[in-house]
Image (cartoon, rainbow, N blue to C red):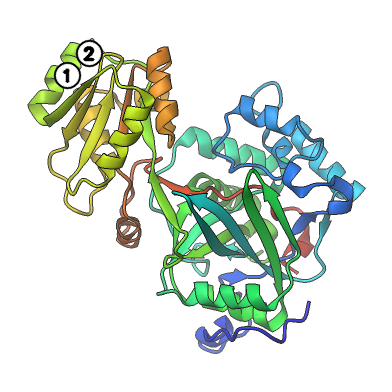
Amino acid sequence: MNSGNGATVTAESQADRVDGRAAVSPPLRPFRALRYVPERVGDLAAVLGPADDVPTAEQAAALAAQHPHHCLHLEVPDPDGRSFQTAARLFRAWRAQGIVQLDGVPTCYVYAHRFMLEGRSRERLGVFLAASLDPHMGAHLLPHEGTTQELVERRERQLEAVQVHAGAVYAIWDGEGTLRQTLEAITTQERPLWRIERSGEWHTLWAVHGRRATELAALVASRPLVVADGHHRLEAAKRYAQRCVPAGSSNHPAAWVPIHVVDAADPALVVRPIHRLLRWLPCGWDAIRAHLAHHTKIVQVTRAPTPDMLIRATETLAARAVPHALLVHAEECLEVVLPGGGVAEPDAMLVDTLVLRHVCAFDQAELEQVVEYTPDVVEAALAVRSGRAALAILLRPTPLETVLAWAESGRLFPPKTTYFFPKLPQGIVFFDLADPLTLG
């Protein structure tokens, strides 16, 4: 690909920004991805997967079974539920057989995802890069949510065994639209590597090489990055690097993590809420309801709500100016006003503190056992109707401005507060932790 033409990236190179010391490794850089070879796998749409935290283990196994080279094969644990030796052998076989192939030069990968939202076509643009995990000179990646120990440990076991990232940490760049403009210019001036349709959505990938890639990485590195999705992947990558990367080996691939960066000003950047499903309640509903009435204002009661009614109710909920939540029980749905909570405090945090920890009196260990999460209102309604969940708590979306402000102040939301829609698929690019050529 000719890297000489196209948009001018105005950020200065990272080497110039660090006192002129060109030997200092930049915190973000292009990398050599492993990518599927279309001639070997056929339809690329058949091997790309949803984000790693979307399917259950059973769903992942079912999706993987649809194609022998589906990327979710690398996510399915062995029968013991803990190890990933089968996935590790499979991935090395893919490399040996040419199912995936290493790109020839370090590259920034520009990715467009076109989807429908509320009857309108949207296109989100982002770029894949490698981010340093060095605690002193690494990328400035700011989390906005907490993590759960179990999921971090599972991801760390997978990384150690399979030695590859099939997905990436999804991060937000807050720079008044400059990155989006730069990526738009690239997509209009360069030919894509591929463009595919899957389930009514379009996915397109471009490659940026050479000086232009270095300048693009420097532009992204010029601002702190707020992690939108992939907190567990990032934490697991850090832990794995601390254990397994020799001191001073800053160019070891395991000392880096793949990230996908989207401009905060991207018009297709969508933040949805993640609703809470409680598998059981600590006492009867009447007692829970009475306790709630002492601490919240119940503004509306709906008997035997249907999924359609709840969809309309959540649309109304999203427009509320103060913290609200819908509590869906088999007998009724309560709309409640949550007390306290400044403008910048997410409803999920208020629900976590008041409803889950105070009214229900669950401790942290119990919460990890009792709470499930879903962004889907219909799934939540059906879970309560079927008895799979004793209670669903439906939330308002958290504004992007609140997400960025909290992350930049060092504060964390509870796990699973935000759902950046649509999720970033797996399998677009692979980042090999065992190949020294990954970083060029």
**Residue on which the image places disc 1:** 289
In depth, the one of 401 and 163 nearer the eye is 401
Q: Is residue 438 visible?
A: yes
> Relative to residue 134, is residue 385 drawn left or right?
left
Residue 7 location (% of width, % of height) = 61, 83
Say which quarter of the image contains residue 278: top left
The circle on residue 433 is none
Residue 325 location (% of width, % of height) = 24, 35
Tell me if label 2 and label 1 are in contact, CB under 8 Å: yes
In depth, the one of 122 and 417 nearer the eye is 122
The circle on residue 285 is 2
- Amino acid beneath label 1: Arg
Residue at left offset 44%, top offset 33% = 374
User: What whole-number distance in Å separates the C-alpha atoms at marks 2 and 1?
Assistant: 6 Å
- In the rendered view, tell whether residue 23 sits above or below residue 263: below
> Relative to residue 71, is residue 278 drawn left or right?
left
Q: Is residue 365 visible?
A: no
The local secondary structure at tag 2 comes to helix
In the picture, the quarter occupied by the N terminus is: bottom right
Residue 117 location (% of width, % of height) = 47, 50
**Residue at the far front in the pictured view:** 119
